Structure formats: structure tokens, C-alpha cells
Amino acid sequence: RQVVEPKIPVIEKKKRETSRSRRKSLKIQSSTQKEKTSSPCHLNAEEETNSSVPSWTPKDRTAAVLARKEELEQAYLQVLLNFGVIAIMLVEKEPCMIEAMSSALRANLRKIGDYYECLLKNYIDSLTEAS
């Protein structure tokens, strides 16, 4: 029997370090989110405080939204890669799990996508309220 190593994309060290800090903050956010509400759009008080800013010019606001969008996309892609690696490893061990995992995996990835979308919407709303 051969051991097959999963193909993991090579990510620069700098990106790994930033994704680790994001994962820590996401773990903290997700644990407080579960305690407070089941809504994916709920922001805790710390996030609301951190995202509140003084007045923005339209150009600065657009730049801030695009930067936040890029951050969230990178975090989302990292989560997708993690799910993908785990799914590949599970299927390699037990090929019969493909059918059982596919719908659950799709549903969970959709929830995660909705969560990141809500984070971006809440950030934009906080910028709108601040100006």
C-alpha cells in the first residue's frame, strides 16, 4: 500500500504568518459569535469598535473597502484550502466518503462564504455610519 501525500499549494512564508493571525482572530470571533447568536452577520462589540473610524473621503473609503475585501478574500481562500486538504485526505483514506461528504461540504462552504460576505457588508455599513 502506498502513502499518497496530498498536494498542498506552496504559500509564501509572509502570507502564512498573516493567515495564522487571521485564523486566531477568526477562532475568537467564531466562538463569541456562537455564544451570542446564530446569525452569520452578527458583529461583537470589539469588531464594531475596531471598524468605527472618523470621517472618510470617498477616495479613502473606496480604498479602505477594497483593502478589507482583499483581506477577507485571502482569509476565505485559506479556509477553502484547509477544507480542501482535509477533504482530500479523508477521501484518500475512505473513498466511500465522497457521497456522504459532498452535500455537507457544500453547505458548510456556503455558510463560510456568507459569513465573510456579511463581514464585508458590516464593514461597509460601519464606514457609512461613521461618515
Image (cartoon, rainbow, N blue to C red):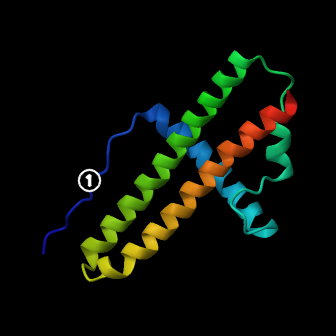
Number of other residues with Cα within 10 Å of mark 1, as a class: few under 14, some 14 to 19, many 20 or more: few
Drawn side of residue 15 relative to residue 49, left or right: left
Drawn side of residue 40 relative to residue 10, left or right: right
Q: Nearer the viewer, residue 51 or 28?
A: 51
At label 1, which amino acid type do we have? Lys
SS at mark 1 in the image:
loop
4 versus 63 height, above or below: below
Indicate the position of residue 7 as horizontal and vertical percent values: 26, 53
Identify the residue at horizontal 79%, vertical 20% (top origin): 56
Drawn side of residue 125 relative to residue 21, left or right: right
Tell me the quadrant of the picture where the C terminus can be found: top right
Residue assigned mark 1: 7
Identify the residue at horizontal 56%, vertical 63% (top origin): 111
86 versus 117 height, above or below: below
94 versus 41 height, above or below: below
Indicate the position of residue 102 as horizontal and vertical percent values: 37, 73
Tell me the quadrant of the picture where the N terminus can be found: bottom left
Tally of marks? 1
The answer to which image quadrant residue 40 occupies is bottom right
The answer to which image quadrant residue 64 occupies is top right
Q: Nearer the viewer, residue 30 or 117?
A: 117
Indicate the position of residue 116 as horizontal and vertical percent values: 60, 50
Drawn side of residue 20 relative to residue 128, left or right: left
The residue most toward the left is 1
Indicate the position of residue 51 as horizontal and vertical percent values: 79, 37
The answer to which image quadrant residue 54 occupies is top right
Identify the residue at horizontal 53%, vertical 38% (top origin): 17
Q: Nearer the viewer, residue 43 or 4?
A: 43
Identify the residue at horizontal 38%, vertical 76% (top origin): 101
Q: Nearer the viewer, residue 117 or 82?
A: 117
